[in-house]
Image: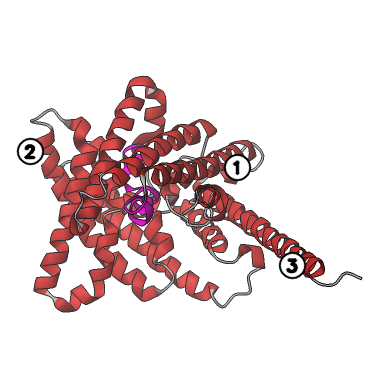
């Protein structure tokens, strides 16, 4: 139990997926200009990430290892992710139109979120068990959500700030992210990676 | 679409790393040393050129509804080839790049160019665009790698993750300043030409 808790803390804070491992930066910069869109993206990503950790684990155990085709893992995982995203979209549309109207536009974007494929690949590389894979997925997703929502808050404040002309736009966004990464380094002493 | 615009866009005006901010994950993650940067830059360039060329070739065969999955499959196949090639010929590099070699699949730049340009344009334009955008990305990646490797001896921050963000932010700011000066310069020369034309067509005393 402690191991699983440590796995979550490690994926969410110490080795934060966005600010330390540089995964999922496209949505981090792309949809963080407003808090409500950041919230929508966080929920959609958490959902898909947890689901794909399971799917990728099953795919690896039932198909890739028996067929001795581990070199095809990139291809297999990306197809599995695309199918999962599509399936999630259909399922949400059918089950809850309200939720669909909130998350709908973010779902297609998730296919090219490298955090999702990154979690699947890291789970494979580190030979996590099914339970560990799921918890690692949840940890990664909560780290992503935490940083995305915090950053959206900072960026809303940044719109009112008086920024020197050359730094306006994407430049100040990245520098702000840099300071946030610096703050997250404070977690690095908590546990051994 | 003219070839000069394609090259200018890729290398400077709409540079993928500095303006479009596509493919940020590999750009920041593997720019810690210049060797890593060159390795991943070349792999991305390879996938980018071939994917643009092949998507342009099959553009009439793909149905609109299934175009994104088919593009992703093409890109994933090419990435797997690049991965196997790197594994065979430069295993230490493959190990130090880690999961960022298979993650070329989710580089938004490659899918973005396929979606925005390669599915409409001819083979020549698409290939050239792949080459231009890939080289634009390569140059930003390598310069960021070189800067971070050199500066990290003096300022340790440059070697840390936050240093990557700040260094890229600075590069973007410099690009914006140069772009603005160029624009002013172009405006001045343009008005000069205009003035001269007025003089030649008018009555010169």
Q: Main secondary structure of the magenta part?
A: helix
Residue B186: x and y in percent read 70, 61
Out of B169 and A3, give the one closest to the viewer: B169
Residue B32: x and y in percent read 51, 39
**Is the same chain shared between marks 2 and 1?**
no
Which stretch did the figure color magenta? Answer: B99-121
How many numbered marks have been drawn onto this rendered protein structure?
3
Q: Residue at (58%, 41%) from the top-left corner?
A: B143
Q: Mark 1 points at which residue?
A: B156
Chain of the residue displaying label 1:
B
Q: In which quarter of the image is residue B91?
A: top left
Q: In which quarter of the image is residue A58?
A: top left
Chain of the residue displaying label 3:
B
Residue B194, numbered circle:
3
Out of B194 and B105, give the one closest to the viewer: B194
- How far separated are the C-alphas under marks 1 and 3? 52 Å
Q: Mark 2 or mark 1, which is nearer to you?
A: 2
Regarding residue B78, the answer to whether it shows in the image is: yes
Chain of the residue displaying label 2:
A
Out of B10 and B190, give the one closest to the viewer: B190
**Is the same chain shared between marks 3 and 2?**
no
């Amino acid at each position: 139990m402690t191991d699983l808790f440590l796995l979550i803390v490690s994926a969410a804070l110490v080795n934060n997926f966005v600010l330390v491992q540089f995964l999922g930066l496209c949505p981090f910069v792309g949809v963080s200009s407003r808090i409500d869109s950041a919230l929508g993206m966080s929920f959609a990503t958490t959902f898909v990430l947890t689901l794909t950790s399971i799917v990728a684990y099953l795919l690896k155990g039932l198909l890739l290892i028996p067929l001795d085709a581990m070199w095809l893992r990139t291809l297999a995982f990306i197809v599995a992710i695309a199918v999962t995203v599509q399936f999630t979209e259909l399922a949400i549309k059918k089950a809850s139109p309200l939720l669909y109207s909130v998350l709908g536009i973010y779902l297609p974007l998730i296919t090219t979120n490298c955090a999702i494929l990154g979690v699947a690949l890291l789970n494979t590389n580190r030979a996590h068990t099914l339970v560990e894979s799921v918890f690692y997925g949840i940890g990664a997703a909560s780290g992503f959500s935490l940083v995305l929502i915090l950053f959206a808050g900072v960026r809303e404040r940044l719109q009112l700030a008086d920024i020197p002309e050359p730094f306006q736009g994407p430049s100040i966004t990245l520098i702000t992210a840099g300071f946030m990464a610096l703050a997250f380094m404070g977690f690095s002493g908590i546990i051994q990676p | 679409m003219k070839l000069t615009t394609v090259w200018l866009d890729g290398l400077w005006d709409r540079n993928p790393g500095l303006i479009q901010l596509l493919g940020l994950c590999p750009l920041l993650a593997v720019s810690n040393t210049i060797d890593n940067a060159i390795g991943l830059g070349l792999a991305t360039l390879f996938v980018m050129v071939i994917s643009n060329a092949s998507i342009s070739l099959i553009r009439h065969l793909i149905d609109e509804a299934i175009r994104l999955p088919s593009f992703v499959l093409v890109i994933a196949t090419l990435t797997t080839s690049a991965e196997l090639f790197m594994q065979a010929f430069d295993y230490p590099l493959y190990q130090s790049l880690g999961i960022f070699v298979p993650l070329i699949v989710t580089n938004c730049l490659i899918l973005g160019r396929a979606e925005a340009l390669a599915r409409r344009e001819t083979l020549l334009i698409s290939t050239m665009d792949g080459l231009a955008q890939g080289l634009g990305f390569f140059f930003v990646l390598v310069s960021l790698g070189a800067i971070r490797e050199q500066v990290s001896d003096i300022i340790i921050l440059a070697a840390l993750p936050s240093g990557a963000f700040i260094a890229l932010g600075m590069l973007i700011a410099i690009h914006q300043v140069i772009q603005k000066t160029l624009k002013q310069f172009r405006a001045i020369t343009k008005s000069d030409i205009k003035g001269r034309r007025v003089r030649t067509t008018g009555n010169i005393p």
